[in-house]
Amino acid sequence: MNALLLAFLNSWRGLLHGARTERAVRQELMLLALGVPVALLLGTTLWVRVALLVSLMLMLAAEFLNTAVEKLCDHVHPAHHPMIGVVKDLASAGTFMAQLAALVVWVAALVDRLG
């Protein structure tokens, strides 16, 4: 149980650090905060509501992983390096794909609601 508590505290510190220092994390946290009530209203079934919320949480998770990769790259190689740029671009592409996936889920839920 102690290990579980410590893991939670580590995650909480990371969440707070990301919220304090990263604009993209703050933006996606705001989207999540706004998305919760909208998902509850927009979703026609429990599973649609779950999909809407999970899509936003996965988008945020991808943003945190992208931020971690960028911080690690900057620490390991602070100067500009072409391969570090490729690694950062790949991590950024991962966040973009998560954002597209969330968009697809939200548009599908909207079409389902209006259709």
Image (spheres, helix red, strand yellow):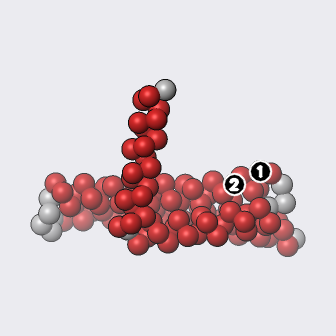
Amino acid type of the residue that numbered disc 2 sits on in the rendered structure: Ala
Crowdedness near tag 1: few (<14), some (14–19) or many (≥20) residues, C-alpha within 10 Å: few
Cα separation, mark 2 vs mark 1, equals 6 Å
Instruction: Specify the quadrant of the image occupied by residue 81.
Output: bottom left
Helix, strand or loop for disc 1: helix
Q: How far from the left and from the top, in percent, is residue 105?
A: 68, 62
Residue under numbered circle 1? 47
Helix, strand or loop for disc 2: helix
The C terminus lies in which quarter of the figure?
bottom right
Q: Residue at x 37, y 59 (%)?
A: 17
Q: Determine if residue 8 is in view.
A: yes
Amino acid type of the residue that numbered disc 1 sits on in the rendered structure: Trp
Q: Residue at x 23, y 57 (%)?
A: 73
Q: Is residue 5 above or below residue 101?
A: above
Q: Determine if residue 94 is in view.
A: no
Q: Is residue 109 left or right of residue 74?
A: right
Q: Residue at x 44, y 49 (%)?
A: 12
Instruction: Specify the quadrant of the image occupied by residue 55.
Output: bottom right
Residue under numbered circle 2? 51
* Residue extending farthest top: 1
Q: Is residue 27 left or right of residue 83?
A: right
Crowdedness near tag 2: few (<14), some (14–19) or many (≥20) residues, C-alpha within 10 Å: some
Q: Is residue 42 above or below residue 68?
A: below
Contact between labelled residues 1 and 2, with CB atoms less than 8 Å apart = yes
Q: Residue at x 53, y 65 (%)?
A: 29
Q: Is residue 11 above or below residue 90?
A: above
Q: How far from the left and from the top, in percent, is residue 7?
A: 42, 38
